[in-house]
Amino acid sequence: MATPGLHEVAMSSRTRIVLAQPPFFRIFGSHNNRGPLELAYLARRLDDQGAACTILNLDRTDATAHCTWRNLFARSALLHAALDGPSPLLYESAERILGLAPDVVVLSAGDALTPWVDLGNAFFAARLAELLRRQGIRCVGIGSRFGTAPQARAAFDAVVDDVFGAEAVSTVLAARSTRPWTPAPPLLAADATGSTWDVIMTSFGCVRACSFCDAAAQPYRPAPPAVVAADVEQRADRARLDIGDAIFLARGARLAALTEGLDRVGRRPGFSIELSVDQVTPGRLAELAAFGVHEVKIGIESADDSTLRVMGKHQRAQQIRTACDRVRDQGLNLTVYVLLGGPVPDSANAALRTLDLCRSLPADDFVINVWAYNRPGARPTDTHFSGDLVEEYGLTEVMEEFFALQAPAKLSIGRLLDIA
Ligand code: SF4
């Protein structure tokens, strides 16, 4: 792995490093106020090495509601314009970054800690990097979207493309430092943009290997319970936290150790977690509820067996139904993730079967995505809410039926407004 742009300069206490999440949802007229987690972990490592770090979440706004997912699909062509033509967001971002007079800028394209979520675009990050490099600024790219966009890398001095970029960089830095590296929580205090920091990690990577997901390439690594507790402690203003783990595997002794850590810092917020279908047993749910879990998210993805096979998801429609019923029987909130389309034989009929299944599930909310990454013929403008992909997969007729299933508010981000 080559990251000369960063580790050559990060040894001085005078080195100013700006870690920026470029606009992404703002391109579509919305926003994402959640703090860029991978950048915050990286900031902690760089801070340990003596650099002065500032995190900029350039996707944040002062809005107190979000547009609907339906609106994002309808506006998805705006990304074409942002990648191909003059973009005010591009110039605004450069202005905000350059105003801090950085020595190095780290630009994210997605987040390798939660790579299954759309948080950035490598080609937009590359345009920003080109602008900054013309001003003589070193640029380093980091994030999961570079994995599917090798063409975007040329705009950077270096791209950290390890499966867990932040740790990869920190390991390089630690190897060159006289100080030992110890695991530590993300450096939220470096954020200069007032982001919402409501996602924590208790582990990194995933034990599964779904073909559409970047997390499949990441080895599973649990974080020390004391580090998790310290991370929860620094978010004392949060009554609820999302655990961002790919799937939350903690149980038995590990769950007890996490509980003990939280008790030691006197914090027991409510948690939302992600589980796979096969993990949903009554005993497990009771254990998780006692830990403080109040919301479970399940990636059902599809009701079509041939699609599930292509996805590498080892679950059947009846198992999905049983798992969802169990979550509700435990009195927990249930959010279901659906992934439509993809390199499958009959995506339109697969979607209809999936719609039937969704209508029979006792879910509070549905997240409706289209298969955008890790597929043949992926394009720079692909997103989980791409109108082009809806057409390509033959889903135009059925999408409105899926949107009708979606709740008018989300536990994590609040109200959704249909702004057509
Ligand atoms: S279970 Fe599959 S979809 Fe979920 S994070 Fe792991 S690899 Fe990705």
Image (cartoon, grey):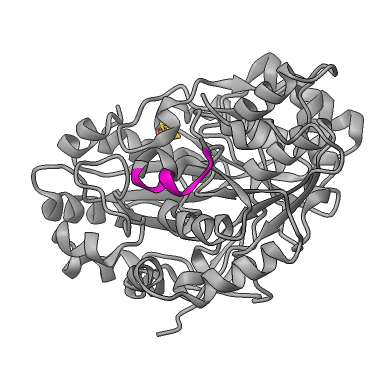
Q: Is residue 380 left or right of residue 131?
A: left
Residue 185, quarter of picture: top right
Looking at the picture, how far across and down is residue 242, in whole percent? 64, 46
Q: Is residue 158 above or below residue 226?
A: below
Up-down: is 6 above or below 199?
A: above
Q: Position of residue 272 (x, y in %)?
A: 62, 45
Q: 161 and 212: which one is in front? A: 161
Residue 155 part of the magenta-drawn span: yes
Q: Does any portion of residue 350 appear in the rendered image?
A: yes
Q: Quadrant of ligand 1?
A: top left
The magenta stretch spans which residues? 151-158
Identify which residue, 132 or 328, lies in the foreground: 132
- The residue at the far left in this view is 345
The residue lying at 18 percent from left, 36 percent from top is 305
Q: Is residue 408 visible?
A: no
Give me the residue at 64% from left, 27% from top. Answer: 167
